[in-house]
Image (tube, helix red, strand yellow):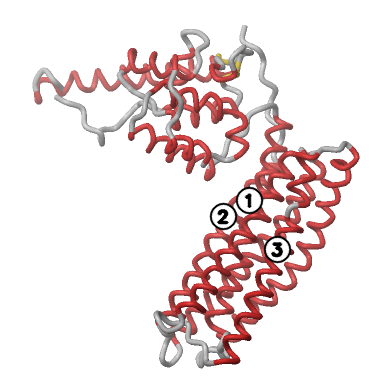
C-alpha cells in the first residue's frame, strides 16, 4: 500500500540528523544523502539547518573544525549519544509492542496487518 | 558546485542575522549542491520563518544567553518603530480631521494610546541614548568604523526625513493656498502621489533607523551585563507597545460601533494601523518573554566531549 503524506510519521528531523551522525561526523550535504539512502526521507535545506541549529543549541551535536567553512562537519556529543540511545530504545520498545499487537489483528485483517 | 539563484539568495537573506552568520555559508553551499528545486525553496522560506519565530542560538551557555538578549533588544526596537508609525497612522485616519464618533470612551482610548506613546517614547529614547553611548564610545576609542557607521546612521536618516517632511509641508501649504486639496483620484493625483511618496520615505527612514541601530548593536557585541539593561528597556518598550495596541483596538471598536460607523477609507487606514500595532505588540511580547526567561534561566550543564 503506498504511503500517504498525511500518515503518522516518525521522521522528526532532529532524530534523523542524530541518527545519521551516529554513523560518524558528516556535513550537511552528506547528511541529506545518507538520510535519503537509508530512510527514503529527503530533508530540505531549511529543515536540515533548523534541526542542526536546535540540536547544537541543546548541546546534542557539535561542529568540528573544517578548512572549508561551507562544509563544516558535525558530530554527536556525549549527551547526544545518550539522548539518541534513549530515543531509539523507546522507539524499539514501541515498535515491538506495536508489532505484537498487529500480529494479533492479522487473523482479522489479513497478512498485511 | 553551482551558486544559489537570485530567488535562493533572497530566501537565504531572509534568515535572522545571527542564523546567517553562523550557518549562512553552509546553508548556501547545501542549496547550491542540491540544485534548484521549488520544494527546497519553499523549505528555505519555512525555515527562515521558523528561525525568526523560534530562534536557536549556538555556542556555550553564556553566548546563547547573550545572543538571546541581543535578539530581544533588536526585535523590540523594530516592533517599537513599527508601533510609532502605526499610532501616527491611526492619528491621521481618525483625528485629522477628527471623526464625529471620536468622543467619550473612544476619545479616552485614543488619548490613552497617545499618552502611552509619548511617555514611553521619552523613557525609551532616554534609555536608548544611554545604550547608544555605551556602543559608540568604546567603538570610537577602538576606531571601529563597522560599528560607528550604523550607530551614527540614524542621525542623518532622521535629518533627511525632516528635510523631506519640510518640503512636503511647504508643498501642501503652497497647493492649499491656491485651491482646495482633494486627496482623491484623479483630481488630486499630484497631491496624492506626494503623500504616498512621503509615507514611503517615512517607512523606509523608520526601518532604516531600526535596522542601523540593530546592526550596530550586533557588531558591538555588548557584554551580557549591558544586554540585561537593554533587555529591561525593551521590556518597558513592550509594555508601551502593548498599551498602544489595546487602546488602539478599543478606539477602533468604539468608532465602528458609533453612529454612522467609519467611512471606507478611514476604516481601512485605522484597521491597518491597529493590525500593525497588534502584530508589533505580539512580536515584542513574545521576544521579551523569551529574553526575560533567558535572564532567569540557569546555565545548562557543560557539554562533555564524546568518549
* Circle nearer the viewer, 3 or 1: 3
* Circle nearer the viewer, 2 or 1: 1
Q: Position of residue B220 (x, y in %)?
A: 77, 40
The one of B142 and A29 positioned closer to us in this rendering: B142
Cα gap from disc 2 to disc 3, whole angstroms: 29 Å
The residue at which mark 3 appears reads as B160
* Mark number, residue B298: none
Q: Position of residue B218 (x, y in %)?
A: 71, 41
* Mark number, residue B283: 2
Q: Are marks 2 and 1 in contact (CB under 8 Å)?
A: yes
Which residue is pictured at 63% across the width and 29% down the height? B58
Q: Earlier in the sequence, mark 2 or mark 3?
A: 3
Q: Earlier in the sequence, mark 2 or mark 1?
A: 1
**In the drawing, does residue B185 fall left or right of residue B116?**
left
The residue at which mark 1 appears reads as B75
**Chain containing mark 2:** B
Can marks 2 and 1 be said to lie on one chain? yes
Amino acid at each position: 500500500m503506498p504511503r500517504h503524506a498525511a500518515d503518522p510519521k516518525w521522521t522528526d528531523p532532529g532524530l534523523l540528523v542524530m541518527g545519521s551522525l551516529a554513523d560518524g561526523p558528516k556535513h550537511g550535504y552528506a547528511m541529506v544523502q545518507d538520510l535519503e539512502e537509508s530512510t527514503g526521507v529527503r530533508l530540505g535545506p531549511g529543515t536540515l539547518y533548523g534541526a542542526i541549529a536546535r540540536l547544537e543549541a541543546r548541546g546534542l551535536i557539535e561542529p568540528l573544525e573544517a578548512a572549508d567553512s561551507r562544509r563544516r562537519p558535525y558530530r554527536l556529543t556525549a549527551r547526544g549519544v545518550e539522548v539518541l540511545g534513549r530515543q531509539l530504545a523507546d522507539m524499539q520498545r514501541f515498535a515491538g509492542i506495536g508489532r505484537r499487537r498487529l500480529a494479533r489483528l492479522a487473523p482479522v485483517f489479513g497478512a498485511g496487518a | 558546485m553551482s551558486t544559489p539563484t537570485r530567488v535562493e539568495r533572497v530566501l537565504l537573506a531572509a534568515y535572522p542575522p545571527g542564523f546567517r552568520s553562523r550557518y549562512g555559508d553552509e546553508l548556501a553551499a547545501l542549496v547550491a549542491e542540491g540544485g534548484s528545486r521549488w520544494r527546497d525553496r519553499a523549505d528555505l522560506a519555512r525555515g527562515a520563518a521558523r528561525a525568526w519565530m523560534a530562534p536557536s542560538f549556538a555556542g556555550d551557555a553564556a553566548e546563547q544567553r547573550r545572543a538571546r538578549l541581543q535578539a530581544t533588544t533588536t526585535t523590540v526596537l523594530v516592533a517599537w518603530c513599527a508601533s510609532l508609525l502605526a499610532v501616527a497612522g491611526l492619528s491621521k485616519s481618525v483625528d485629522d480631521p477628527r471623526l464625529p464618533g471620536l468622543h467619550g470612551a473612544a476619545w479616552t482610548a485614543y488619548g490613552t494610546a497617545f499618552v502611552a506613546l509619548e511617555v514611553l517614547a521619552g523613557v525609551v529614547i532616554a534609555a536608548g541614548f544611554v545604550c547608544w553611548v555605551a556602543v559608540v564610545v568604546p567603538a570610537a576609542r577602538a576606531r571601529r568604523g563597522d560599528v560607528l557607521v550604523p550607530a551614527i546612521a540614524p542621525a542623518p536618516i532622521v535629518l533627511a526625513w525632516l528635510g523631506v517632511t519640510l518640503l512636503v509641508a511647504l508643498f501642501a501649504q503652497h497647493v492649499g493656498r491656491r485651491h482646495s486639496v482633494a486627496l482623491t483620484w484623479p483630481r488630486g493625483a499630484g497631491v496624492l502621489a506626494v503623500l504616498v511618496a512621503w509615507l514611503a520615505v517615512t517607512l523606509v527612514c523608520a526601518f532604516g533607523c531600526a535596522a542601523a541601530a540593530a546592526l550596530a548593536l550586533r557588531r558591538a557585541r555588548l557584554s551580557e551585563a549591558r544586554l540585561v539593561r537593554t533587555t529591561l528597556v525593551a521590556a518597558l518598550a513592550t509594555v508601551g507597545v502593548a498599551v498602544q495596541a489595546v487602546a488602539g483596538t478599543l478606539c477602533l471598536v468604539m468608532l465602528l460601533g458609533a453612529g454612522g460607523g467609519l467611512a471606507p477609507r478611514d476604516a481601512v487606514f485605522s484597521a491597518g494601523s491597529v493590525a500593525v500595532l497588534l502584530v508589533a505588540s505580539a512580536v515584542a511580547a513574545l521576544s521579551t518573554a523569551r529574553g526575560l526567561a533567558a535572564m532567569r534561566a540557569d546555565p545548562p550543564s557543560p557539554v562533555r566531549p564524546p568518549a
